[in-house]
Amino acid sequence: MKRRTITDITRVEGHGGISVDIKDGKILDIKVNVYEGPRLVEQLVVGKSPRDVLNIVPRICGICSLSHRYAALLALEKALGVKVPKATEMARNLMLIGEILQSHVLHLYFLALPDFLGYGSSIDLIDNHEDLIMLSLGLKSFGYRMNQVLSGRMVHGENPVLGGFGLFPERSALLELKEKSQEFIAMVQSTIELFASFEFPVTYDKEITFMCLNPTDGEYAYLGDSVVVSDGTEWGIDDYKEYVKEYVVPYSSAKRAKYKGKPFTVGALARINLLGERLTGEAGRYYKSLYSNNWKANPLFTNLAQAIEVLHCLESVPKLVDRIIKLKEPGIVEAELDSGASVGAVEAPRGTLYHYYEIENGLVRSCDVVTPTAQNLDDIEKSLKIAGEQLISLDSMDKLESTLEMITRAYDPCISCSAHLIRINYTDKDS
Amino acid sequence: MLNKKRIGIYSFTGCSGEQLVILECGKYLLKLYEVVDIVGFPMAQSKNTIMDLDIALLEGSITTESQLAELKEIRDSAKTLVALGTCACYGGIQSMKLGEGDWKKRFQEVYGADDKLYNKMKPMESKPCNEFVTIDYYIPGCPMDKGQFLHTISHIINDTPPHLYPFPVCTECKWKENDCLLNRGELCLGPLTRGGCGAVCPSHNIPCVGCWGPAEVTNMPSEYKLLLEKGYSQIEIFRNFRKFGGTPMVEKLKNMMEKLR
């Protein structure tokens, strides 16, 4: 048996590899190995105050630190009886939109695009695609500017605190975001068209099981109290442990999850498949003209789904800003309780993110975090196997490897976040 | 420049925040790619090596045996080693319980009691890079500041020593003429924390959380006594000192308690 190992998947966030077992020209197995160093974050927050939690958990991930902060805020505030005013809620939603924008732009232009255009890095694109590079740099800076206005800085801003904002974003800064987003709306449409023009090296015919939060207001948004699944079921986020069943595999240090014993996918492609009909404006127009049944089966459509979401996020900025500036500037709502337990969930750039905290006398007793990449890992392996079987007849092992990397990358795995939060369920509790 | 310097960016355990800051350098990053050879940057490019480096930029703390081996290889290969961010410089949040013991137990509570993964991963409690190799320059931050990074790297590329930032957050806060949060009774770590962030949290009415790591010269006993007077418990104060304090804070706390005895 021959084993090909892609030791380090490049152009992803974190450290992971893929191992492919081949015997007599057939794929025996493909595994995704994650070898992130341990940080034990869920252990670090035990015995800490809610304020400490908000300093610590965003550090799980530099890309989606605000999603972690938001999910933790929702859980902690619900547990401690804090109800924030509408303006606070909307400013936080604007913050989440900024993060999704920034994260998708990083993935689309810097991590994924070189695959489709045949380059080793996005920097190499500068000679032949300068306009694309300049657009991506501008968009990314705009995403970070949103992070800065709402959270205080580019990465790991501490401004969103329990009950509100340390300093509520200034009206002039919000209006600046509104104006700038409108400039980009016209510019990103060429990117959607570019990603729509790419041909995929692999075909898929089996429908993927998708899952995302169901926004209560009927809009295409990133928050909700229930989870909608492509099999038609819907359940409240408080029950996440029943539906998102976590387990571990011996060959990798990242936790996995199954839904009804099967792999599933979260993230931009899940959201577009489940909520795409709700898209309005230019994003809605692109959805209607580009969406097909193939999106239900091929994970490589994640890139295009993200490109549509970039446009949707940009189109959401002026609407949200207009609503926020009409409202009275909110203060910070103090916690009424010092004990309680609750779940908080947001749609992070890569999919549904759950945080759970149990607080007793003002200190954390237990914590559970389920990240999107942990939920996607099984489906990543599944789609790699399907691709491997189609590509094994190719003479070129390099082509096989590069395609497997490309598919892995399409999921936009945030390997560092998936691996830092692992807990094994003991099956032999009596021993 | 006749011979372009060979630079590599390598990541250990952390949140990848420093690589993100480098990617966000925009036109300066494009310029950097012009004036040096970036031969290692796994988050941005497919081809990467650690061979024959002039400058290695390190992100993250060391938490496994294989990371330690890689760090030593990079030290052997590189003329200059620069630690980027609080994790690489001081150990990061994952070092906040250093010295408390029970590390293996905490590992098992998260990863399970089965030794298979432990034996395969060969993990260790998080420590900063300078616990194992000599580090030439430090750019702390959580994440580091873009301006400080560009300043430091430009100096190193041009063989002139970079100017470091010795003052605490408190100094920057005074420059901004912010109302003092300690005076308001908040548990603010500004006097103890390395500056460079522009006192971003106090400028948002939020006490400094210490995320840039401990400043070298501080009056820690005075801050400690002040916080006790304000009604904070020793446990709470130490918990905050240690949150981002890493290895230097272990030593500083020990010294302080000896002095106060």
Image (spheres, coloured by chain):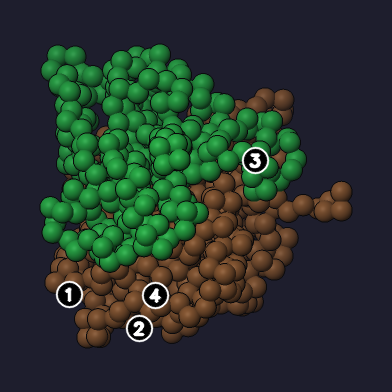
Chain colored green:
B
Tell me which amino acid carries mark 1: Arg
Nearest to viewer (mark 4 / mark 1): 4
> What's the residue type where badge 4 is placed?
Gly
Q: Point out residue A87 in the picture as x, y percentages from the top left corner.
A: 31, 81
Task: Report the residue marked by disc 3.
Answer: B102
Residue B46 x, y percent position in the rendering: 40, 32
Which residue position is annotated with label 4?
A: A163
Q: CA distance from mark 2 to mark 1?
A: 16 Å
Q: Is A426 placed left or right of A43 in the picture?
A: right
Q: Amino acid at mark 2?
A: Lys
Q: Amino acid at mark 3?
A: Asp
> Nearer the N terminus, badge 4 or badge 2?
2
Cα–Cα gap, marks 2 and 3:
45 Å
Decide which of tag 2 and tag 1 comes sooner along the chain: 2
Tell me the SS state at disc 2: helix
Q: Is residue B72 above or below residue B91?
A: above
Circle 3 residues within 10 Å: few <14, some 14–19, many ≥20: few
Colour of chain A, in one word, is: brown
Specify the subunit that label 2 lies on. Answer: A
